Image: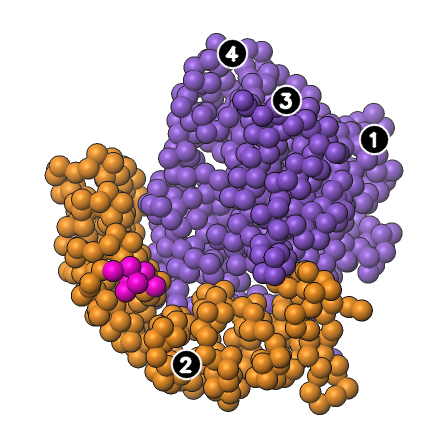
Chain colours: A purple, B orange
Amino acid sequence: MAAALSKIEQAKADLCGLELEPQLAQLASTGWENLDEATLTIRLKWLGIFFRPVTPGRFMVRLRLPNGVIQAEQLEVLADAVDRCGDLGSADITTRQNIQLRGLLLEDMAPVLSAMQAMGLTSRQSGHDNPRNITGNPFAGLDPEELVDTRPLVDAIQRRLLADDAPTNLPRKFNIAVGGAPDSFLLHNDLAFLPAEHNGQLGFTVMVGGFFSAQRNELAIPLGVWLTGEQLPAFSLAVLRHFERCGNRQARNKSRLMYLVDELGLEAYREAVLAAFADLGGQAQPHDGSHLVQRAPRSGLGVQPQKQEGLVWVGLSVPVGRLDAASMADLAAIARRHGSGELRFTEAQNVLITGVPQQGVEALLAEPLLQRFSPTPGPLMAEAVSCTGNRYCSFALIPTKTTAQAVVEELERRLELPHAVRTHWTGCPNACGQPYMGEIGLMGAKARHDGQMVEAVKLYLGGDMGADPKLAELHDKGVPLVQLVPVLENLLVERFGARRRSPIA
Amino acid sequence: MPAVAAPSPEVGVAPLPVRLKSSADPCNVEGDPQRWQQMQRLRRGQEPVAAWLEGLLQGELEPAPDLLAALWGRLDCSSVERLLAAAVGSDPTPWMEAARRELPLIAAECSVVQAWLEPLLEHQATLANPQQLGWLEVLAHFQDPRVAQRLRAVVLEASRGPWTPDTWTGLLPLLPLLGRQRQHRDAVVLLQCCLDPGPLAWRQAALEGVALGLSAWPLPLLRPALLRLAQDLDPAMAAGAVDLLARLPDGQRQLRQLAALQLDPTVAARVQRRLQRSAMVLVVHGRQGGDIPSVSAGADGAG
């Protein structure tokens, strides 16, 4: 007898969220309070619309920005959408090179989605059990160290996976990334294509099964398959179709791709996927899994030469990835005024202004916005990554973004560091802020302090995204936030070569 | 010994799932992954509810917000009545937090309405302040004319002043909740709270109430009130009104009227920005003629 469907699987089977798009205006008119839970919390996410229990009535829209590329005029439309929400409007750059807008009313959705569509933007299938925003080398097409330009590949994969015949009911979310440089760390993705050679030809070795969750954290492992760039879209589709058909739908905490690999065994899984690929007319080459990714990601901040002579990109640090309407509009204006009009978002939640002529750098660096979004941030701020936190997320146990920013600023006041230290802040065990990837990872918790339950963090240490990647491990299971600065200060001195600044007389 | 013991299936009433005041493990609290997963299982119906309920009724479990949040969708009416009648039903503080976390997601579900609405209405009415106000905030997550009526009465009473902080600061969350009730007649109440002299935070909370019920309010009331508010001396209030005006079907015409007036420079700039992107103007308002659409609980036969 077939097992009964879970509540979530039942909701997905009853109606695909994509079918709600023509009804958005009507749903808004009726009011979100009258929507059933499945529509409110599950189906709308197929359109990229997120009900936020912490701010009921103020919704979030998560876009899709393949490879993190956005044009100034597109960012201006998003800035306007956020601006209409006044003090409640904001946007976050995400760890998938993406952007999400906050503070919108359900009434805004139909016109905002329509305005986005007119500018070539979509929020389709950016949440829940869907293939999420596909990431690539943030410096693609600009990078003197680039092995392959990931932009057209990422675009092609997205087009294939959002086509009408692609799966729209996966057992769980699915992350895909394409590497294009020696520092493309991507092993936290369910499916990662890393640049690799085969018989003297540059293509991609396939890694599968990476993910972080409250239950289990894994880095992707080699599937033993090599593909050319042209094969990536069809292969991605084959993987998704197999996952759709065979993934675990009984237990959501055991439904990410790695569990399927475990269940079938790597050999059997590879054969099954290759068979699905063959159904699409594809044929892959066997491969030993070796690849050309050899070091931890560059931040890309500051003034960086492009491979195009006379041009640079300027990487700006956006503290913990949070933007407001004015800063979004300013970024768009700066990109248009000083660069090619294109911007990039990085997985470290920062922004790049691309195509800046050398002679225009000085003027760009004089822009007032750069007082907030520095091209030369401190060594901690440069690589501070944070989830949303409890201002907007009901799971988060601490205000991660504001805490991260305040703690990092204070530490930079107290310490001199010889190099950047990557901190990853997350508000709950779901690990959206990827604490296991940080040299220092911090996870929101509660702990007893002076007889009271207080906001705290668990500390993780040792995450490494270099040639020998590894996940951070638990170091301390409950540091109250009030003690966090001195605890981190000592850690940075003892383990990361920081020196205390001399007190100012 | 595990920090969290799962209820045993062998006995009629399982042992208490979480030990109280354990000092052995400082993380045996909200945020501990084991506890977090247990609450998720409880919320999803993958864990029996009886032991948790009994623990709360007997005062052996702390009414932690994460536990209460997990129970909103799991209890029937009689269990709710017992819970509210017990000691755990007096202090609304953890319930308010639990309600904020969970009820926006499930307060429209028939089973949740059936289990909670009537007992909460009765319970709230029996208490004295300040508990009564706390429980009103819990109750206000349910959309119901009786709830709206109680909210309206409290808001109207407070809006008469005097404006001493202890009379109104605790009521701020009620204004957006009143807007979420989407009762036709509350447009006047909320707009008046925006327009009348009063503390800025009060007026801003009322404006958020207007925003959250926007498509339910009658346009003939909304347009002139927002136009007036867009000329408010406080730029933040004025800006909010401009943004709401821009969402109305004929908002562009209203904005052009505003553009001809002398406004605070930041507000004038906002008006210009809203005029520049007319493609994003809301066109859905008023499909229901300003009335609340009928809630289909009865029609669904779910009672």
Q: Nearer the viewer, mark 1 or mark 4?
A: 4
Which span of residues is magenta-colored? B164-170
Q: Nearer the viewer, mark 1 or mark 3?
A: 3
The chain carrying label 2 is: B
In this rendering, is residue A168 above or below B120? above
Give whichever of discs 1 and 4 has the lower sequence position: 1
Q: Position of residue B235 (x, y in %)?
A: 24, 42
Left/right of residue A384 with respect to residue B107 in the rendered view: right
Give whichever of discs 1 and 3 has the lower sequence position: 3
Q: CA gap, disc 3 to disc 4?
A: 16 Å
The answer to whether residue B97 is visible is yes
The answer to whether residue B143 is visible is no
Q: Residues within 10 Å of mark 1 (few under 14, many from 20)?
A: some
Per the picture, the main secondary structure of the magenta-coloured stretch is helix
Whether marks 2 and 4 lie on the same chain: no
Instruction: Check disc 3 and report the residue beneath it.
Output: A143
